[in-house]
Image (cartoon, rainbow, N blue to C red):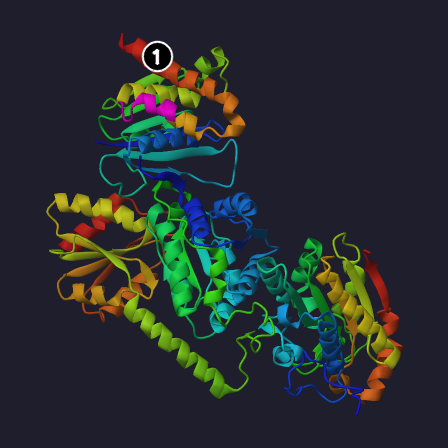
Amino acid sequence: MTYETIMAGFGGQGLLFSGKVLAHAALIENKELSWLPSYGPEMRGGTCNCSVIVSDEPVGSPIIAHPNVLMVMNEPSLDKFEDTVAPGGTIFVDSALIARKVRRTDVEVVYIPATKMATDMEAKGLANMIILGAIVEKLRCVDPDNVEEALKETISARKAALLDLNLKAVEAGREFIRGEKA
Amino acid sequence: MAIVFEKPKSLTDVPYHYCPGCTHGIVHRLVAEAIDALGIEGRTVGIAPVGCSVMAYDYFKCDMIEASHGRAPAVATGVKRSMPDNIVFTYQGDGDLASIGLCETVSTACRGENITIIFINNAIYGMTGGQMAPTSLIGQVTQTSPYGRDAKTQGMPIRICELLATLDAPAYLERVAVNSVAHVRQAKKAILKAFKNQVEGKGFSLVEVVSTCPTNWGLTPDKACQFVEEKMIPFYPLGCYKDRE
Amino acid sequence: MSSKVLMKGNEAIAEAAIRCGCRHYFGYPITPQTEIAAYMAKRMPKIGGTFLQAESEIAAINMVYGCASTGRRAMTSSSSPGISLKAEGMSYLAGSDLPALIVNVQRGGPGLGGIQPSQSDYFFMTRGPGHGDFHIIVLAPATVQEMADMTRLAFELGEKYRMPAMLLADGTMGQMMEPVVLPEDTVDPETIPATKPWATTGTQMKRPHNIINSLYLKPDELEKTNYERFERYAKLEKEECRWEEYLMDDAEVCVISVGITARVAKNAIAAARKEGIKVGMIRPITLYPFPKEPIAKAAAKVKSFLTVELNMGQMNEDVKLAIGCSKPVAMCNRVGGMIPSADEVLAAIRKEAK
């Protein structure tokens, strides 16, 4: 199985980082993978996305034309990528930031108010990790436990204090999916 | 019989190609004397410029590198950073150091690289046949200022020692001349000091030598020395501009 | 546990260089390669190396020139506009027969261009990376692993043939992360200068002076140095060509592509194969020397060639030259920072297969 994930939103929402954590989790599992950021002149506020491929096969192009996983954290990103999603793919929408619904009917959609959840649990800025938790819980593209392991390895010593909060955010996302299933 | 005069040991036997009356020969000698005095020939690496002294690499017995036009201080930086215990000097003319390589000159000075720069200012491009230099005097006639350098269209001459003296990093900046015996003696002291500073790890040292170009100035060697005294030195006052002792 | 680590291509180059005994990096910031400088800035001070942010690309390459003169493994990195500024220095390095590593993580041009990936410096790097008659070794990695492996290769080939070597990547290769096994840290930087008797390390009063120089005012002498250099190039061309063949055994269409577009092409080839189209790929790994032989051999078997590249057809010309225009050589390209999608490449393959 090959998971081609695009994570998109505004710069500063931590999209490159959540992609990096996913990639790192795949590395722990010795899977084939690639991580490719969009890069532009602006550091904050501009549109931003990254492409993460996790596969059992060697990765060809790291550029994703038709993602089967899409995570969007602003409306322009949903507008931009909705039509590119492969039929049968899954779209994760931060419903606290995006008012509109997904128009496609041939994809699965998870609406998760991640930004509001983050604010409520005093983990502002970690909506990205909440959605990542939801993605891995729902799709099992990597073992969710390895996401936690990846976080431990990725968060720099300078920000070690934030590790617990990140772990909680991932767990909140997983819990959201478990609750949805129940 | 006692030897009272001999060629410095750190000069090769290759005859200079310089024009009669040119002061490069004197300055080469002073550099070699400094290298001899400090006993550093075996660990010295010199950087030759593009200009009349381009073939300086043939004249000094130490290891030599020929740099592209103006980049000698950058090349010297690369050498010094890879071999901090070696002694590294550049030998550059006014077009090389003060025009095309000004950025490298200022930046290297600003970093306080522990190197020695010998800067020959003779107010003209010699090797290419006598064009205006950044240091050519107002009114000076050259191939590219045939009506005399005009400040309005060709700008004012640049004073390198004064310019670099505004920086915090350089250790030693001095302007000397070699148009008289007294001046040569002073120049010898300054050049020795610029090398000694490096040996002692004091940092960036530059000696500007106000020099002649009889051929392109259209003067006899003697008249050229007079020109230095009467025209050059008044605009480029000799003396020490910085000495962080 | 595997020793794979997750790294950006740019970072992999930097770490690999250090592990190959490079202790001197001189650079200037420019997107999309700045991670190399940032990585070196962090690491070099901790291992007694030099990281120096130069005042310009010109100064940086000349610092490399000075450092390489002393026999050290020196490097610089930049992206297309910055490489233009390094052209003078590359010419002097070549003229003085100095090995050094230059990394070019290409972006779109000409002029200030853009910051998105490009392969538009192909001609510049393979034909004339500066004034005068000379070549530099040009290596084109297509994975982060190759970014690391080719860093070592570039140092080694450069020293073997006494010439500058370039890693020619594109913005995508520099920015993407993949698992990479870094080269073993087995090179002692202190031992490298001793292998270079020509280095200007100071005579120690034990030998005649060494001179690093590219000036020869006598034309017959200069001519001799040019001929001597091109003899080395001939040996390089004969012995050091590298390429990858992919599904070429029964191929009727041969894709030629490097770097990121080779990877896009792989996806397209897989899709075309599913449709029953017999298509394969030759991926040049050395761009100078260009692997003419395998391409010429392929010409005897295939119906046509298709170059996939991020320029207006620069490598396309090399393919035509390699096969003496004996078969059609089509092109699928995007420029300015755009990258052809696998679908676009697939459409081009279909057209060639008809």
Q: Amino acid at mark 1?
A: Glu
Q: Residues within 10 Å of mark 1 (few under 14, many from 20)?
A: some
Image: A83 above or below A178: below
Residue B93, quarter of picture: bottom right
Query: Magenta region: which residues?
Result: A140-149
Q: Which residue lies at the image location 53% right of the left edge and 47% below the top edge? A: C47
Relative image position of residue C94 (x, y in whole percent): 47, 70
Image: C115 above or below C198: above
Q: Which residue is mark 1?
A: A175
Image: C13 above or below C193: above
Q: Which residue lies at the image location 31% right of the left edge and 47% below the top edge? A: C340
Relative image position of residue A68 (x, y in whole percent): 27, 29
Mark 1 element type: helix
Q: Nearer the viewer, residue C16 or C8?
A: C16
In the image, residue A142 lies in the stretch drawn in magenta: yes
Relative image position of residue C148 (x, y in whole percent): 38, 50
| Chain ID of residue with mark 1 | A
